[in-house]
Amino acid sequence: MSRRLSLPPARRAWLDVALRVTAAVFGGYVLTYAATAALARLLPLARFDAAMLATLLSFALYTGFVLWAFAAASVRRVWLGIALSLPLAAVGFWPVWFGGAS
Amino acid sequence: MSGNRTFRQSMSWLHGWAGLLLGWLLFAIFLTGTLTVFDKEISWWMQPELRDTGVDQPTAARFAQDWLAREHGEAAVWSIGLPTERSPVLKVSTGEDRRAERLVLDPESGARVPVRDSVGGNFFFRFHYSLHLPRTLGIWLVGLAAMAMLVALVSGIVIHRHLFRDFFAFRPVGSRRAWLDGHNASAVLLLPFHLMITYTGLVIFFLIYMPAALDALYGGDRMAMLREASPGAQAVAGGMDRGDQRSRDGASAREAPPAELLPLESFIVPAEALFGSGMVASLRVRHPGRANARVEASPLLGSRIALTKGEAAVFDGVSGKLLQAPAEKRPSALTQRVMAGLHFAQFGGYPMRWLYFLCSAVSCAMIATGLVLFVIRQRLKVAEANAGQGFLRLVETLNVGTLAGLMLGCVALLWAARLLPADLAGRAGWEARLFFAVWALAFVHAWRRPPMAAWREQLWAAALLCMGLPLLEGFSAPSLDKTRLLLELCVFLCGAVLGWVAWRVGKASAADGVSRSLEGAMRC
Amino acid sequence: MLTGFTAGLLLAYTGMLGLCLGLERHYRQIWQQVPPAWLRRTLRAAGWLALALAFPACIQAWGAAMGPVGWFGLVSLTGFALVLLLPLAPRLALWLPAAGGVLWVLLLGAGLWRGEPF
């Protein structure tokens, strides 16, 4: 953090943009992937319907996240948001990871 | 962008850059998509040997059966494309490969019609979803562009909320103000269409783009998931899954004793009972002349909104019994098919086709005006800061090469279809190469010429090629019919519009373009 | 089908025209005077009514499932055409539905004549 503050402003702006774009495109995809898996697991519907509905909604989710990633006050907050994908993935994939029956 | 911007400012920044960087790709996708609405008509025009003989489906089926039995009696599979409203010719092929060359037969003369090898309107379709790149790469790039479109649309709504109070504003006074108003009007009035076409485009390949739920609930097994799509998918009576059938093909084809195949025309009526009258597109016969002959009838796309691609009714070829009807889908699976169908736009006949064509033409115009607006603003910034000329030049070049150059390439493809020798080896490949060569040249030209001159010249070239298309009919094969005449008329009108734009561009640049455009940009 | 389509087209255009003229700025564009509030309200209400009537016409043309899709397309496109026409030929924009109405009646007549009314 202190190193970034010592950068000249133009450079810092570029770094901010690069970090946001990476966060939005790749981080956003990872988060959407995890959230879709979790949603499919949690929806109280038949397996097929839950998978279908979650996947169809995923593109709206991704769009919303990308917009937020560019609107958020700091890049750090965006990356913290992306860290949410770990618990979400755990919800989505727990039977696969921990070997329980779904 | 720094941290202390307002929400609207950051959305405006995002709208501008996402729109610019993927705008070129989006324009190419939308323009080819617009042309794909009339893909069959374009194919018909590109192959002037094709003639509508007005043969009805039963006659065509009877003739195809006789011809195939005579010429390909031993083939394991016969495929018969029946004459339909938009493609009124009989086409046959043999073998398992669905992309095998299809021969055109003329039931009237009883002979094969030699047809030139052409990419047809299918070229635009393939470009639209895969950019003619390797399939996976192309599909992901198009998906990325579609996401950028969604982001640009939603951020555009956020920054221009005020427009929804009065979306009839269009002031073509100062020519630059007109660009902004045109961009806004095309975006706001057709917003439902833009959102629908972009989202449903993503939904077509939903399991490729977002396999999360598939991975989590089905361990990534696509077939397992798709099997659950229709609850009542059991075969009607002793029919088998099409996958099973294919795997047993090799073994049983030779074993089954010979048996007479029913006349193929007799399958059209029961198939129409399932798909609707006039809605049978093709018949596929497995093991013709054997006791285990199967006849699969496929529907014409567009009997309903939901996309019916890949569906078929399977009949016993000897007894004529229905073995398997297209399965009713679960509501959630049907939702996806309806969304895909909304994108494919095969329903509702020609009036609906025209609505889709015009709506997506407006989408193209929205993307194009957005790209032009970016340049206008950038020009102002460059003049203020006296820096960034190189970047501006690059954007201007890409704008001309993508917007005008692609249109030039598309109409050049039509010319190539008629002008290349009909018996050239690998002809379809040369058509495609010519398209890409013209497009590439457009970029070179745009780079070498001053921007306004490049705009004018390329637009005029495209306009003249469009307006000259009816002339081409005059000195190539005499093949004029209603479809071809209408297509030529439409292309001529498009050419007239392009010529008008080129004329306006010429006038604007002649009247001291730079200072006026700066003035206009400041008012934006 | 074509009569339903034409009816939908005309009603959609008329509806958008009503909504547009219900706004002070565009009313002035054509008549160069400020409309009274009651007139604006009436025009807007008539516009919404015409748009609503275009809906059954589209259902008539395409059926219950595809009709709404066609309705959206017609409303959007006629609105866009109006936007283009208004500054270039405001009088034409105004009289277009009347001319279209004649066309519709002719089409209707042709339909009746061929024994397929509406």
Image: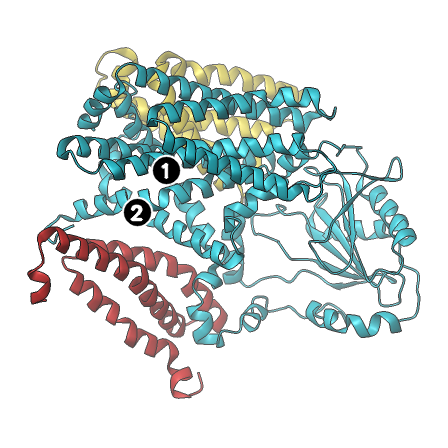
Chain colours: A red, B cyan, C yellow
- Quarter of the image holding residue B349? top right
Give percent across and percent down for residue B76.
82, 62
Query: Residue at position x 87%, y 45% from top?
Result: B63
Q: Nearer the viewer, mark 2 or mark 1?
A: 1
x, y (%) of residue B355?
51, 34
Residue under label 2: B18
Subunit of label 1: B
Classify B227 as above or below C71: below
Residue B334 visible in the snapshot: yes
Q: Earlier in the sequence, mark 2 or mark 1?
A: 2
- Horizontally, residue C65 falls left or right of residue A80, namely right
Q: Secondary structure at mark 2?
A: helix
User: Residue C72, labelled with which disc?
Assistant: none
Q: Position of residue B319 (x, y in %)?
A: 87, 62
Quick check: A74 above or below C76? below
Q: Quadrant of residue C112?
A: top right
Chain letter of the residue beneath label 2 in the structure image: B
Seen from the viewer's position, the closer of residues B87 and B273 is B87
* Mark 1 crowd level (few <14, some 14–19, many ≥20, 10 Å Cα): many
With C28 as the anchor, is B296 left or right in this view? right
Residue furthest front in the image: B448
Q: Residue at x 80, y 32 (%)?
A: B53
- Front-most of residues B391 and B37: B391
Question: In the shown orientation, is residue B512 left or right of residue B249?
Answer: left
- The quarter in which the C terminus of chain B is drawn is top left
Find residue C98 and report its horizontal and vertical position in percent. 46, 15
Of the residues shown, which amino acid type is indicated by label 1?
Leu
Any mark on residue B398, and which? Answer: 1
Which residue corresponds to the image point at 38% horizontal and 16% vertical from the top-left? C94
Work out whether residue A46 can be spotted.
Answer: no
* Amino acid under disc 2: Ala
From the viewer's perspective, tell me whether residue B138 is left or right of residue B278. Answer: left
